[in-house]
Image: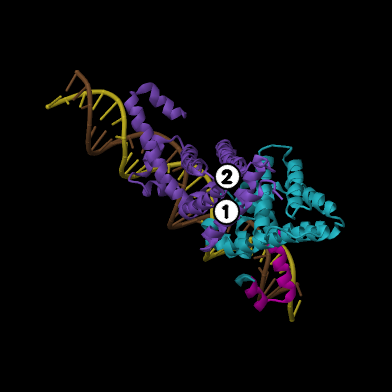
Chain colours: A cyan, B purple, C yellow, D brown
Amino acid sequence: MTEVADNKQDRFTRRQVDKFAQRRTELAQAALITLSELGYARTSLREIAQNSEFSHGVLHYYFRDKVELITHCVRQYKAECVKRYDEVVDTARTAEELATGFGAAMAATLRADARLHRLWYDMRNQSLFEPVFREDVVEIDQSLERMIWRIVVGYGTLREQPLVVAAPIAYAMFDGLFQQALFKFVSGDEQAAVELATTTADMLRRLVTPTS
Amino acid sequence: MTEVADNKQDRFTRRQVDKFAQRRTELAQAALITLSELGYARTSLREIAQNSEFSHGVLHYYFRDKVELITHCVRQYKAECVKRYDEVVDTARTAEELATGFGAAMAATLRADARLHRLWYDMRNQSLFEPVFREDVVEIDQSLERMIWRIVVGYGTLREQPLVVAAPIAYAMFDGLFQQALFKFVSGDEQAAVELATTTADMLRRLVTPTS
DNA sequence: ACCTGCACTTGACAGTCGTCAAGAATTTAC
DNA sequence: GTAAATTCTTGACGACTGTCAAGTGCAGGT
């Protein structure tokens, strides 16, 4: 928890704390829209406030500074992001169903959330320059790696075959594929999504040792 | 060529043009240092000039605006970057030599040029938000893809085995591996480089169909 | 010796940025 | 219904940004 939230928790009732937290996420949601449109470099607090129904001063009432606001945004984004994939691995009954389902899920989120994904990569890169963001980025990255690993393990189990890669390598590979597809998609390539679906499924099939 | 350079070419002697171009690359080199240290978002023209031996005004004498300067920087970076890898594929005589040599080259450039690489990823991400950079980024990305493809094809030829992936997928995979390694390396993980060397070599070996 | 044109510096401009204090507006408590 | 505490707005601050006009110093040519 943040210091501001802690202060609130000390001084106010539980109900006020909830309201406080609720407005924080509300503002973070508005900020997330602006951030995903403009990117980290060109997003100002005034611009964020203009895309909400409040004035720019309110941001410093709910967040200590710009860093805390953006950190909160990224954490909020993570919660949404990982949740979606887990349905895929849970619903799949056969290996082939999982492979095509995973590919379809990747393609779907590429189409639907392209701007949020480019924001994620933007923040991950910013963390290479500003250590303030590094901790949160590492946490999100690990949760994404675990998400990918659940898919891979689930596929290996359904095919009853041993896996040939470790979790970090598997994640790096799929992430590389997704990033290239995102780049093409944002550049206007309409086929990027369907290509991502097939290449993702193909790669998943290849991550277990061939039968022969 | 840029408009500014064209104007110079019209008005001045060839020698003056060379001098002009030389100073441009000189300033771009200084800018490259600042950019790789601070990242795109926080690099100002005054900061760039302060890391050179000139004042901030001179940048607008040699470059139309900030975009042209940074574009020039990125292009200059590309030239250096691709050059290094080609030595590897040219000198390798056996498949195993190529695999380990490629891994070693990846680890070496990770160690030596980590800051330049994170700048590259920063610029590639910026191009997702600012279309001004997209053209140059695409060009560099394609040249990197070709570089990777030369490695992969060279390895397949030496092992006399057919390849199982297309060029864009191979590039995406290696790029994903490198990016993860870069992240760990910048975060202080000393082992990131050696791990990258082995995982890179392993992946290259796996890109041809197994004999069995 | 003087002049012309190039290379570079200086200082200022209009704008934007994050931050915060002071106060208005609204809600809550009694 | 009034007082107190909250939520939110407004306006200002100093700092920083990209850009550019004006001017300095200096070279080479005549």
Q: Position of residue B67 (x, y in %)?
A: 50, 39
Residue B94 vs B193, above or below: the answer is above
User: Tags 1 and 2 in contact by the CB under 8 Å rule?
Assistant: no
| Chain of residue at mark 1 | A
Query: Residue B139's spot in the image, x, y percent?
Result: 56, 36
Q: Which residue is mark 1?
A: A125
Does dot 2 land on a helix, a strand or a loop? helix
Res. B124 mark: 2
Viewer can see residue B128: yes
* Relative image position of residue C14 (x, y in whole percent): 48, 41
Q: Which residues are magenta?
A: A5-27
Percent x, y for residue A116?
68, 51
Residue A81, picture quadrant: bottom right
Residue sitting at x 75%, y 52%: A204
Q: Kindly identify which chain the residue marked by label 2 belongs to.
A: B
Are discs 1 and 2 both within one chain? no
Report which quarter residue A21 is drawn in. Answer: bottom right
Pointer 2: residues within 10 angstroms few (<14), some, or many (20+)?
many
- Residue visible at 84% across and 51% down in the picture: A96
Q: Is residue A183 above or below residue A53?
A: above
